[in-house]
Amino acid sequence: MSISLAAEPDRLLPAEPGVRKIARGLLELVSDLPIISPHGHVDAAVLDKNSPFPDPATLLISPDHYVTRLIHASGVPLDRLRVGGSTAASPRDVWREFAKAWPLFDGTASGYWLRSEFEHVFKLEHEISEATADATFDAIQSRLSEPGFRPRQLFKDFNIEVLATTDDPLDSLESHAALAADATFQGRVLPTFRPDAYLNISHPTWIENVDQLITTAGDGTTGYAGYIRALENRRQHFVDHGAVSADHGVRTPQTLKLDRAEAESLFNKARRGEATETDRDAFEAHMMYEMARMSVQDGLVMTVHPGSFRNHHLPTFEKYGADTGHDIPFAVNYTEAIRPVLQDFGTAEGFNLILFTLDETVFSRELAPLAGFYPAVYVGAPWWFLDAPDAMLRFRSAITETAGFYRSSGFIDDTRAFCSIPARHDASRRIEASFLARLVAEHRVSESRAAELIVDIVDAAPRRAFKL
């Protein structure tokens, strides 16, 4: 696997020369368009403080569960992949483990992103291997120490126009306010309201979270009514700081409309620590309905990310915590689950509901038909395990014949890895060019329309879906 593959100008484009030529022309139309990133997990403080990035392992390996999970699957304990873990692994030792494992990433999306970063961001001259581990570590460390290699300069170099973060409802949004007030910073960094820990009563600190929410953000009202009012107040706080969306990382897309008395009864039962698993599911489903109601009220786009069995391996979770590589997708049902929300709000003016999935069978069977009827519904881009070249092609094929090109969200990089953002968006643009080139070659879309469509997909679609 050669690092020079990332420099190949026709990477990810079709192999057939005629179709590749069409794709190349389409790609040229969007290669230099700014990056619109309306959903991701980069901390706003990274740009606010503009501090130097840490060492290569702390930046690229230890926090990236896409990377550590695959190395762990080959038998390497997670301790040896975590800087400062219980075995006090040094950054260089972690990097050596990664370099030794680099062949494991052949054909994977993670390998593609990393190879692109090494080539285009870090300008590595050596192939990653066990033999070059120290040399590549030192080369990246040298790059990280350069004055021009700070987050704000990279934000500019990457041509990012909009970057959305993901934030706790009680976050002060201090960094967002500082960036918005800084005339020297060009670009938009937007907060995103993420209330999962306040809606899911099985969350280990749900009671404490709710108490703090009502105390901090309420208007003096107690109980369930105070809880609802506090959520509404915090949403408005986010809107006032530039937020355009509220994101929901729920277990399932289930929604449920309860009357006030039923909801209050479940809320009080949960506050006493008496809620059952059935109560948990019912309350979270009801609160998803409430979040939709609030989105109609305050205008925040509602994004739904269900279908992940979080923390599948309990011993790993107990030792290392969440987001350590063992979240596993499972099948979901959208048609019935989301119906209560769509019955009341599916045609509501100004309501945008973006539905994501980790279950590929849902794209053509449920999401494309829903987006093909309800004005509120947009199909979310391939996410997480599906954020990969072949999966992106399958996604576009699955939804287009039913929903067309204008009912999808545009690309979502959904990443914590700041340095991978340009690689991810570039890959998406190449895949869209490839898909459209095939339609042109098959005389299903004219080349002039394909040129209009690719600009819309890359630039107009995320602005439209996320009200940018």
Image: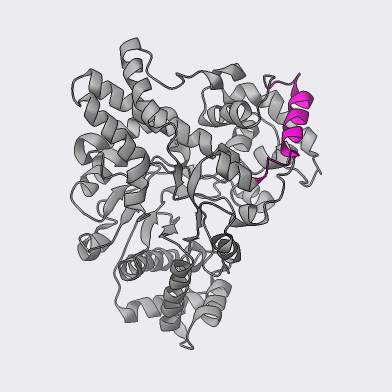
Q: How many marks?
A: 0
Q: Horizontally, is 446 left or right of 113 in the view?
A: left
Q: Horizontally, is 219 left or right of 371 in the view?
A: right
User: Does residue 61 show up?
Assistant: no
Magenta span contains residue 206 = no
With respect to residue 219, does 330 lie above or below? Answer: above
Q: Position of residue 20 (x, y in %)?
A: 35, 16
Where does the N terminus fall, quadrant-wise? top right
Q: Nearer the viewer, residue 31 or 73?
A: 31
Q: Horizontally, is 424 left or right of 99 in the view?
A: left
Q: Nearer the viewer, residue 118 or 374?
A: 118
Q: Position of residue 343 (x, y in %)?
A: 20, 62
Q: Position of residue 183 (x, y in %)?
A: 57, 59
Q: Residue at x 50, y 60 (%)?
A: 191
User: Does residue 38 show up?
Assistant: yes
With respect to residue 272, does 167 lie above or below? Answer: above
Q: Farthest residue in the bottom direction?
A: 220
Where does the C terminus fall, quadrant-wise? bottom left
Q: Nearer the viewer, residue 193 or 255?
A: 193
Magenta span contains residue 132 = yes
Q: Residue at x 78, y 46 (%)?
A: 84
With respect to residue 330, does 71 lie above or below? Answer: above
In the rendered structure, which segment of residues is drawn in magenta? 128-150
